[in-house]
Image: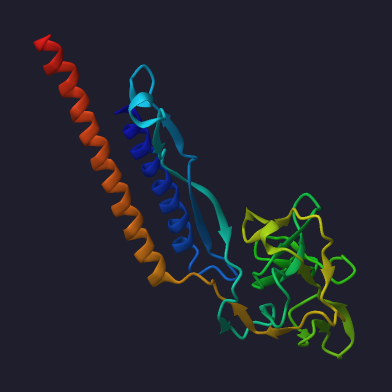
Amino acid sequence: MLRGLYTAGAGMIAQQRRQEMLTNNMANANTPGFKADQASMRSFPNQLLKAMGTNHMQKFGTNRIGELTTGVYLQEATPNFIQGALQETFNTTDIALLQGNVPGQVTLMYSVENNEGEVRYTRNGNFTFDGQGFLTTSQGNYVLDAAGERIQVGNEDFRVTRNGEILDADEQLIAQLNVAVIPDAGQLVKEGNGLFRYGGEEQVVTAVNNDGVTYQLQQGFIEQSNVDTAQTMTEMMTALRTFEANQRVLQAYDRSMERAVNDIGRIG
């Protein structure tokens, strides 16, 4: 009976964590460049049951009864890197990254510098500039060029070509906006504020003048979140109902144990 309690409890915990993940997706449905998380549910290893202290082996030639499942858990939440739709904003500091042909698990992202001076990656092209004229994300992270340097645009009077060249009002080259080639998107870890940390062993290279990948930048546009709100709402309802079903099973076990302790114990 206690095994049943643990199994139902594990199911409730898994669905609660899945619900939290889906809620976070819904909360960021309007966040530019946000990549929705997907849940990977796994079952705990089954246990092998054997008969002990009985004549089961003499009757059936084995003391093996069968397997017992021990519940499920949410193994991980992995981002979905499908391209989001583009929305026109007419802001010169908004730059959308349109990913073209890329092989396998490769994805393209902007390179930025976080508050600790470390390189991070993002698809949120909702840029701005600080008091010194450096191009930054809306959270204040510096946007980097192909050489890994900060980009000083001065003001919003600049133009970005489709391959990422940033030109001033006189059509003079300011910098080459970097587009990083992430060789394995599965090794990207979310750090909040639209930033990703890459933990893979393969080296991150630039897509600039790289014949292996194609991309296009659109100034005056942002990439919207790739959250499917209708699908997410459906999954949230499914998670809630599954949680409630496990909760009812847990309550049934609790009532059975209460009766076993109180009623049967009184008879004895």
Q: Is residue 215 found left or right of 170 in the rendered image?
A: left
Count the marks: 0
Q: 179 or 57: which is nearer to us?
A: 57
The quarter of the image holding the N terminus is top left
Which residue occupies 9% across, 11% down?
A: 267
Taking the view exactly as shown, the residue that stands out farthest to the top is: 268
Dividing the picture into quadrants, the one containing residue 56 is: top left
Q: Is residue 259 found left or right of 178 in the rendered image?
A: left
Q: Is residue 261 visible?
A: yes
Dividing the picture into quadrants, the one containing residue 136 is: bottom right
Which residue occupies 30% across, 44% down?
A: 246
Taking the view exactly as shown, the residue that stands out farthest to the bottom is: 170
Q: Is residue 151 visible?
A: no
Q: Position of residue 242 (x, y in %)?
A: 31, 51
The quarter of the image holding the C terminus is top left
Q: 198 or 221: which is nearer to us?
A: 198
Q: 203 or 28: which is nearer to us?
A: 203
Which residue occupies 72% across, 70% down?
A: 106
Q: Position of residue 73 (x, y in %)?
A: 47, 44
